[in-house]
Image: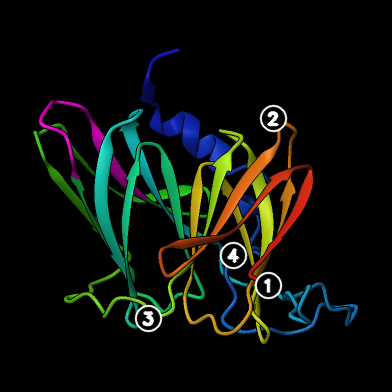
Amino acid sequence: MSSRALTQGLVTLYAAGCLLLSACGSNTGCVTTQSGTSLGGFGGCVTGDVVAAQTSFQMLGDVGTPFTARISDTQVAYTINGVVPLSVILVNSHPPIRMDATKLANNSALLSLEIVFGASIKQISSTQAPFGSVSVQTDTLNAFAELATYDVRFMVKEPAGQPFETLIEDTSNGFQVAGTAPALLLFAGASGRIDGQFQQLTTKGSFDVDLLINGSRVANVTGGPNVTIKSP
């Protein structure tokens, strides 16, 4: 198999499971399920109502290409350093959302940045220039917001190509999210203690998930098909 992350093939993986359904994605608040049962480890809950399809940002191209990026909505921004491929999801976002990325390599490797809404590619920007830059946005966002002061991230590192669903929570709110590893979930507006409950949609191996707060890894969990990770 080529070392290049083929766009359409990865989109098919990202579309697996929940991403195809209108009842998935990040909710702008926490309401009880239709049965009234809380699903959260801290008493948070996940909606039983229909919400908009999920928006994600996909860093694709030649596998292993390093990059630095900034993603922002109208309220908060995050800086990301990583390598291709990586799926980035801003949980509890306040659109429009913009993401800029710069390749950290002086070569002709492909770096591609896509907005995927549900299972559809809405915008794409690519470069093969040395230290080239790419930028996409869901709508016009003229300026980046301030960086998050409480920077909460879930990094789903393994297994590669594993589609999953998760419930991300703090002590007040819960948000249902779907993705494919490797994936970075940025939890905007979080407060207090944090947890994440991850469920595999197929079986490709064991989860390896980090919880990072303000740049420090505060928890790690491995295993499957279901794992839970919590802040101390």
- Disc 4 element: loop
Image vertical order of residue 56 relative to residue 132, above or below: below
Q: Is residue 26 magenta?
A: no
Give me the residue at 27% from left, 38% from top. Answer: 66
Q: Spatial distance from mark 3 to mark 4, Cα to Cα? A: 24 Å
Residue 212 or 37: which is nearer the viewer? 212
The x and y percentages for residue 127 are: 16, 37
Number of marks in the image?
Answer: 4
Answer few, some or many: residues within 10 Å of disc 2's Cα (few below 14, many 20 plus, some between 14 and 19): some
Read off the residue under disc 4. Answer: 25
Q: Nearer the viewer, mark 3 or mark 4?
A: 3
Left or right of 132? Residue 59 is: right
Boundaries of the magenta span: 103-114
The mark nearer the N terminus, 1 or 2, is 1
Q: Amino acid at mark 2?
A: Lys
Q: Nearer the viewer, mark 4 or mark 2?
A: 2
Read off the residue under disc 2. Answer: 204
Left or right of 217? Residue 85 is: left
